[in-house]
Image (cartoon, rainbow, N blue to C red):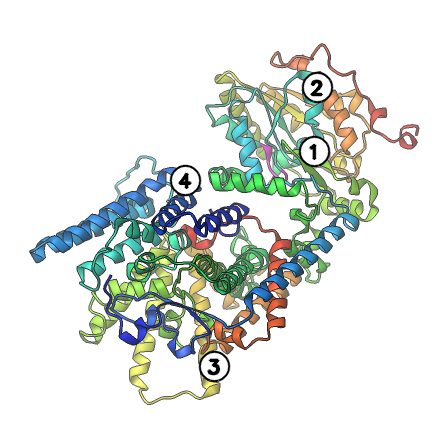
Amino acid sequence: MIFNSLTFLVFFGLVMALHYAPFFSWHQKKINLMIASYLFYAAWNPPFVILLWISTVVDWWAAQWMVRAKAERTRKLWMLTSVVVNLGMLGYFKYGGFLMDNFVSIAGSLGIIYHPPGWDIILPVGISFYTFATLSYTLDVYLRRSAPAGSFLNYALFVTFFPHLVAGPIMRPTELVPQFEEPRQARPNQIFFGLALLTLGLFQKVVLADGFLAPVVEAVYDAHGKMPGMLDSWVATLAFAGQIFCDFAGYSTSAIGVALCLGFAMPDNFRFPYGAVGFSDFWRRWHITLSSWLRDYLYIPLGGNRHGQARCYAALMGTMLLGGLWHGANWTFVVWGGLHGLYLSAERWLRARFKGFTPGRAALIGLALLTFLLVNVTWVFFRAKTFAGAGTVLTGMAGMQAHPAPLIAFGPMIIAMVIVSAILGTHLTMRNTTLEAVIERTPSVALAGIWTALLFAVIIEQGQGSAFIYFAF
Amino acid sequence: MHSSTSPSERGLTGTRDGALPPGLRKTAADRPGQAQPVPTRDVPLKPWARIGTAVFCGVLLLTAAWEWNARANLGLRAGDIDDSPQAWAEARRAADFAPVAIVGDSRILFDTDQARFQAMTGVRPVQVAHVGTDARALLEHFANDPKFHGLLIVGMADTMYFGMPVIGLGGTAIHNYAKNDKPSQLTGLWIDRWLQNYLAFMDSDYRLSIMLPKLDHGWRKGVDSPYENVWKISEDFPGRQFFMWDQIERNAYLRGHARHAWDGFKGPDIPKSVADKVIARSAEAVRRIRARGGDVIFVRPPSAPQLRVNEQKRIPRALGWDRLLIGANAKGIHADDLPQAQNLVIPEWSHLSRRCAAVFTDAYVRRLVQLTGRLKLRADAPPPLSRADCVPQTIASR
């Protein structure tokens, strides 16, 4: 089920009714929420609920046995069991075909012709997200950052809680399990604000990402052999920067709003990322729950910045390359991650080289725009399905296409650029504040007008119920 | 559950009235290498109940005005339930064990009156045709489906069947079939249909993102502007019953635009070698369906002379249609060969008017029952229709 669907509206109405029904105990309400979450997930592909169960049960028991274990070696064994089971399922379903393809290619280059059996695996929706969420549970227990959850129900509900289940924010058990321990009900203000956030998220997804930006992107990135010129390549790539933000941040905002309506708090996942100055700043603002997960469970264990410069750069590159691969089983994603790794490394070196440098306001804006520009270069590898496709667009962006063809009509181009400029402008002006702070300063009449306009736009756009891009990850 | 958060952070857990100062609104990015505490969601201090009520009333008013505009000015009607990838997937699933299914492009989709078909034969065909597609892709999809043992009617527009450079929208529908057949998609489809029985504005051709770009009347040379795209030409009813939208018959501007959008079906001539490949693949698909006990009959609906001249030029009947029937060893019904189907009303030159669709269906079904033993004309079948049943008298008398 997706937030931008009529099915979800009915589902959410029923969940709210059950959650606020006076005749259910808190325990029963949690069971209701868990059943609803399973239904939410099973609405895609019912058999894949089994994977959720496996992940839930294995990690619950791994943590239990970890705590009971007396020897450090036994604790490690249980931690590894959890890691192997979770990454094993992720590897099989997400990377099985990719690994096989690469094996066949390498064997072929060595003169060995190998025809593998058919590998027709369907990727379970959101497996990357809930795998990371459950892994953080056993890893936190292993690292003694937290104790295991006191109740299986609370833990199982943490794994399956539908607002974050399929596309994040990737929650840690310490963020959510305590919220299940005591009865929670949102006050009317929280419910209305949650609905406002849900509207904002749907507007980003349905109207901006799917309605106006996606067609402009597709005109160039799915052009079937036509060569885009400089203007088209840049416009399509900038439009994709807007699309991927509105798509993903739209999901996170909707998820936060939905959870708030139920009385639960979820963490920020985006903090005006296109207003970032530098790449470390970008990653503190973009997909925060993933970048912090990678930092805590990959970068720091790989050595982080505590074992010298060389180890630090290696850890940085390793983390970003794997982070790229997390997004999809394709080398283009690895290159996307690698480019970010290089940017982060270069920034780190520059910061060390020019330690005393404090940019003024103009320099800050210039650096923010440079960051945005370079981020856009990486988006080419994220969006293009092949290196040839990425090469075509990059050649176009460099103005080196021999026989470019105009691909984007002027009207959609103008609309897309107005939207992207508005996003960029908003991020630059709001980089040091929060949406809530700005809303608090906005007159109520204006707020009502904006909310009405957003909701009305969602209604008349209707939407096609297309899935969020990150569902594929 | 223990966490390693500081006491000051622990005080800010859960939800909080009033916006937090930016410095205190922390995220996981601010807390490296530690268990993350319960996040804080601050709710701006505003009269949210009053704002929410105002928004509800405002949206209700605007939506009512939009609905009025859709009915009064655009000519849209409630009950026109729109087609969708999910509706196609639902029909495709229903066709698995159907005695008769129809595939093809938009012509057979518009030009088959399912109720007439059923009244004549007692069988309602499952409509699996798709707009903007190469029908061969759909034929092959059925050929690869071991569940199908029925009669497959393959409708075609020659240039699209023999020479379409890409498979088109039918290929996308096939590609997304499994995805669109999921419980979440189908329940969404059912709710959407229920709503469309009451709301006229819910029409995918009149979405905000479709209407706004149409302001571009060809501002950039070398690119087809959104204005040039095909606009709404059909009304869609349960069972994927498409009919020509009556506004196309009544509104000269919309009709003129629809004709313009077809661009006369102009294009390069289709080489014999390409047609040969299409025929070979079609023959293989027909062979596979027959091997399972099914059968295939091709149908070529009519097109207006303004298009037909270019279609005939690009792929003459002798090169395409006739050789297809020989190559695939299949039977076919060409509109040219049906006396009752001549000179019907084709408002935008490519698809029949709603009333003439019934006449064409009547004509081709009467021929169909002669070609296959799988269908029989019912004893109480309605009497034959003729051109006079659908062509306005002023035109018919000419």
> What amino acid is at disc 4?
Asn
Residue contact at pointers 1 and 3, CB within 8 angstroms? no
Mark 4–mark 1 Cα distance, whole angstroms, equals 34 Å
Location of mark 2 (residue): B119
> What amino acid is at disc 1?
Phe
| Nearest-to-viewer mark from 3 and 2 | 2
Residue A45 is marked as 4
> What amino acid is at disc 3?
Gly
Q: Quadrant of residue B266?
A: top right
Judge if badges 2 and 4 mark residues of a common chain: no
Q: Chain of mark 2?
A: B
Residue contact at pointers 4 and 1, CB within 8 angstroms? no
Location of mark 3 (residue): A366
N-terminal of the pair, mark 4 or mark 3, is 4
Residue drawn at 52 percent across, 18 percent down = B290
Q: A19 or B370, which lies in front?
A: A19
Mark 3–mark 2 Cα distance, whole angstroms, equals 72 Å
Location of mark 1 (residue): B110
Q: A223 or B237, which lies in front?
A: B237
Q: Which residues are magenta?
A: B131-135
Q: Chain of mark 4?
A: A
The spot of residue B245 in percent (x, y) is 75, 40
| Nearest-to-viewer mark from 2 and 1 | 2
Q: Answer left or right for B2 relative to A354.
A: left
Mark 1–mark 3 Cα distance, whole angstroms, equals 57 Å
Residue A373 is marked as none
Q: Secondary structure at mark 4?
A: loop
Q: Is residue A105 visible?
A: no
